[in-house]
Image (cartoon, rainbow, N blue to C red):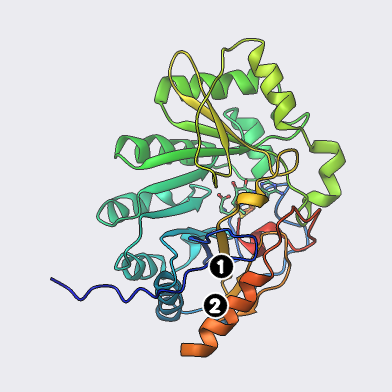
Amino acid sequence: MGRPFPYSNFKLVDGHNRLIHKLRISLLDSCNMNCLYCMPAEKEFMAKKSWVSAEELCEISSKLVVYGIDEIRLTGGEPLLRPDFRAIVKRLDQLPLSKFGLTTNGIHLERELDFLKDTSLRYLNISLDSLNKENFEKITQTNTFSRVYHSIVKAHSMGFKVKVNAVLLRGMNDTEDELSKFVEFTQKTGIEVRFLELMRIGVANNYFEKYFISAGEVIDRLKLKNRLEEKEMPKDSTSFNFYLPKGGEIGFIASESRPFCGHCSRLRLGADGALRPCLFMDHGVSLRGLKGEDFLKTLKQTIKLKPHDRIKAVNQAMHQIGG
Ligand code: SAM
Ligand code: SF4
């Protein structure tokens, strides 16, 4: 038997009595898609030399686990573009996590599935903004629909816990035909589909008035054709979900119209090692090189900055913060 994990008695409870136990790690800020609402035309990516190494990243994560982090999700940018992705997963796999996940655009997912199935990383959120090939390719500005779609189906067939994330944009992918396709997809495959409201982050601030559609409006439209049965969700869930009568499940992440900040239990670690208390805060505090009391002091200070209410908007790009 290995040594027991050296948990601390100090737990990450913030000033609003929220127990912080989830960590999002952005592995890098670059990407192989150009989603209209995420990637600005003028892109600026972090120099590779600024990335936290696999070793340091896992050292920081391990210290955070000591203080109660028990769920980790890898994101970016596109996390599968990180050359040492497997080394990072292998190291994090050693930590006592209750949930280990990945958010990806799916382009390179298929090649990683055999590797991932031998790790504890089971939770895959895959972005697929449209089931209409042309529309998907218009939104992502790539010709990768078939690749992404197949990776979703394959991951599900291999037993991964897959969720599809779709950001709905008014006039782009919110038509009756698009919504029906998503409903049919979840009914047919049993894969949960989550509709994300466009958030006022980075480049999306420029298109917000044009493209935003609320979860409430989408639900009203769906209810015209489908019976939706509300599902009970954990208090700190970012989504609220409905079962469909013929099987399948749809969820809504309504950060704009129904923010969940009051119950937020997350911290975010940037590719440069900066810890952020909130998605909507465009600065973080670096944890690099911090040891012992200094690490804990910085952690406590960062948690104090965690807001209770939704900050209206942030200018920094989503691919830089880590979605
Ligand atoms: N590249 C990966 C992907 O697309 O899944 C991971 C990073 S991406 C920033 C994470 C999620 O954030 C994706 O589901 C994406 O659609 C979503 N996203 C990006 N910008 C957004 C915005 N302004 N509002 C809502 N969701 C956004
Ligand atoms: Fe890349 Fe994900 Fe942003 Fe799309 S949403 S540009 S896939 S980081």
Mark 1 nearby-residue class (10 Å; few <14, some 14–19, many ≥20): many
Give x and y (percent) for residue 4. Answer: 23, 73
Q: Nearer the viewer, residue 308 or 62?
A: 308
Q: Image point 71% across, 22% down: which residue?
A: 175
Q: Secondary structure at mark 2?
A: loop
Taking the view exactly as shown, the residue that stands out farthest to the top is 225
Residue, disc 1: 28
Where 320 falls versus 246 (above or below)? below
Percent coordinates x, y for residue 67 in the rendering: 44, 72
User: Which residue ends up furthest to the left in the rendered image?
Assistant: 1
Would you call the spot at circle 2 few (<14 residues within 10 Å), some (14-19), or many (20 or more)? some
Question: Which residue shows up at 69% across the image and 70% down it?
Answer: 305
User: What secondary structure is marked by label 1?
Assistant: loop
Q: Is disc 2 in contact with disc 1, using a CB cutoff of under 8 Å?
A: yes
Q: Is mark 1 within 8 Å of ligand 2?
A: no
Tell me the quadrant of the picture where the N terminus can be found: bottom left
Reading the image, the residue beneath label 2 is 51
- Quarter-wise, where is residue 86 in the image? bottom left
